[in-house]
Image: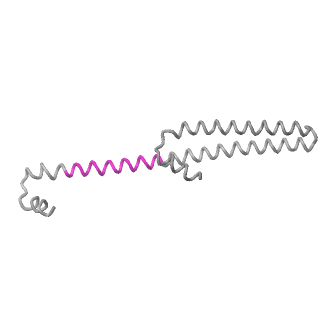
Amino acid sequence: MVYISMFLMVNMEPTDFYSFVLPLGVLLVILVSLVLYLARKEESLEKRWNRLTRAYISDRLKQEKIFAEELEKLQILLQEKSVDQDTYVRLKKLLERSLTRRLERLNARTKVRLQPATKNYDARAHSEGS
């Protein structure tokens, strides 16, 4: 390594500059630009992931809030004796199935949107969920 640097400094001719130094400089610029491009791309994927995660959580919370409100209305109907116990149980199961279906649809939509994400983001989601 020392001999190469001495060679470039001591016996450097203009043709050496064009054949060694200039291509190395161009290669360095290309590599730095590639690193910056990939860093920006990863940053944009991170922002997109966070935005989708927030949207998923807010949609899920809305669905659960709707379920809780409907269940509360159903309990009020039971307390007011508008429905009997058997009807209450059937309607409650129906509400639970409805919530399950809505959450499954939400999960299916989210999986479709999140599928193009990189593997390390999927692994991060699984590690955060555990």
| Residue at 68% across, 37% down | 102
- Where residue 90 sits, quadrant-wise, is top right
Q: Which residues are magenta?
A: 24-45
Judge from the rendering whether residue 52 lies leftward or rightward of residue 85; answer left or right: left
Left or right of residue 97, residue 130 in this image: left
* Magenta stretch holds residue 40: yes
Magenta span main SS: helix
17 left or right of 127? Answer: left
Q: Position of residue 122 (x, y in %)?
A: 51, 46
Q: Nearer the viewer, residue 31 or 84?
A: 84
Tell me the residue at 52%/51% (across/down): 124
Asked whether 99 or 76 is in front, the reply is: 99
- How many numbered dots are placed on residues in this image? 0
Identify the coloring: one colour
Q: Is residue 14 above or below residue 91?
A: below
Give above or below for 82 relative to 24: above
Residue 92: percent from left, percent from top: 81, 39
Q: Is residue 64 left or right of residue 81?
A: left
